[in-house]
Image (tube, rainbow, N blue to C red):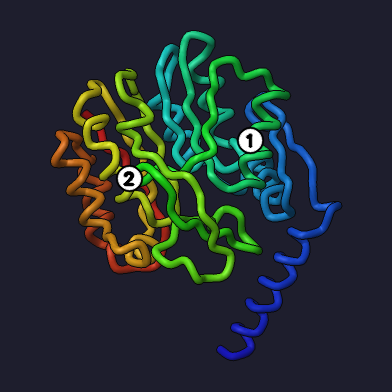
């Protein structure tokens, strides 16, 4: 066990060092778009998606729910893997609203927006939460996919970022699909989107569930289900069964709620 911990620590330090290297930059063609990685871990992330070794099931699931003319909200857009797919699926008559607060990921997303001339995409350098203003945000030195809001200001990598309620950002706009992937802060996003959830029909919400991350943010899988169901969204029986069976395990999974 001690040897395994040492190996993990070495890999973490190596990845952090590679992320700081100027050569660990590049771009990948994915979903008929040019996407960028400004850290080594994001470039590797793009290559794994390109090779079909990561994310294929989730992307296929989402593609079944999104179509021409829809308005899609991508909460936690990262470097744009889902944003690029959404831009293609909704077409010129649709709209993609992408949120990403982390500076390196934001720069990559903004570069993709310019390069690919996404006229149907708007991007916001903010985090979605249950309030509008500013909160602390932790940036991982070795895994830019694990950035998240924080309850504490003194932790390593924490900085102040702008946060916004989706109800404020989307006020008066018709929304058809919301994707949420914010490393445990999904409940805060949903608490700030109650009017959006109630006021849009039809609507689908696909959100990540990570019990350990939710607990770190002061939430739980049960709260996620409650926030969705109290606004009239229904989660499929399979997803509910799975949620009950692994609620206490430290692993990721996704649910889709529909209204």
Q: Is residue 184 above or below residue 25?
A: below
Pick the quarter of the image with the N terminus: bottom right
Q: Residue at x 50, y 49 (%)?
A: 161
Q: Which residue is drawn at 67% across and 18% down?
A: 117
Which residue position holds label 2?
131
Which residue position holds label 1?
109
- Between the residue at mark 1 and the residue at mark 2, the CA separation in whole angstroms equals 24 Å
Does 71 sit left or right of 92 as displayed?
left
- Mark 1 or 2, closer to the camera: 2
Does 28 sit left or right of 206 as displayed?
right
Where's residue 108, x and y in %?
68, 39
Pick the quarter of the image with the C terminus: top left
Q: Residues within 10 Å of mark 2 (few under 14, many from 20)?
A: some
Q: Is residue 192 above or below residue 71?
A: below
The kind of secondary structure element at disc 2 is loop
Q: In this view, does 186 lie above or below 30?
A: below
Where's residue 30, x and y in %?
67, 32
Quadrant of res 223: bottom left
Q: Residues within 10 Å of mark 1 (few under 14, many from 20)?
A: many
Quadrant of res 149: bottom left
Quadrant of res 70: top left
Q: Is residue 207 above or below residue 85?
A: below
Q: Which residue is drawn at 48% across and 34% down?
A: 60
The kind of secondary structure element at disc 1 is helix
Where's residue 215, x and y in %?
32, 66
Q: Mark 1 or mark 2: which comes first in sequence?
A: 1
Q: Which disc number belongs to residue 25?
A: none
**How many badges with numbers are in the image?**
2
């Amino acid at each position: 066990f001690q040897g395994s911990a040492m190996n993990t620590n070495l890999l973490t330090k190596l990845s952090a060092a590679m992320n700081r290297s100027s050569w660990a930059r590049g771009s990948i063609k994915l979903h008929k778009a040019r996407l960028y990685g400004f850290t080594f871990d994001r470039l590797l992330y793009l290559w794994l998606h390109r090779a079909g070794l990561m994310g294929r099931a989730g992307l296929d699931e989402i593609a079944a729910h999104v179509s021409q003319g829809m308005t899609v909200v991508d909460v936690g857009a990262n470097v744009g893997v889902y944003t690029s797919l959404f831009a293609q699926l909704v077409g010129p008559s649709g709209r993609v609203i992408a949120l990403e607060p982390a500076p390196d990921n934001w720069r990559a997303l903004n570069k993709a927006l310019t390069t690919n001339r996404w006229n149907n995409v708007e991007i916001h350098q903010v985090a979605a939460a249950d309030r509008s203003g500013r909160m602390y945000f932790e940036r991982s030195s070795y895994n830019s996919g694990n950035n998240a809001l924080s309850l504490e200001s003194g932790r390593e990598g924490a900085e102040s970022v702008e946060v916004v309620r989706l109800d404020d950002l989307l006020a008066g706009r018709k929304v058809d699909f919301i994707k949420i992937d914010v490393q445990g802060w999904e409940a805060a996003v949903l608490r700030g989107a109650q009017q959006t959830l109630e006021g849009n029909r039809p609507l689908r919400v696909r959100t990540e569930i990570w019990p350990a991350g939710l607990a770190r943010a002061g939430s739980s899988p049960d709260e996620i289900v409650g926030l969705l169901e109290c606004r009239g969204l229904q989660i499929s029986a399979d997803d509910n069964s799975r949620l009950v069976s692994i609620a206490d395990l430290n692993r990721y999974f996704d649910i889709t709620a529909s209204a």
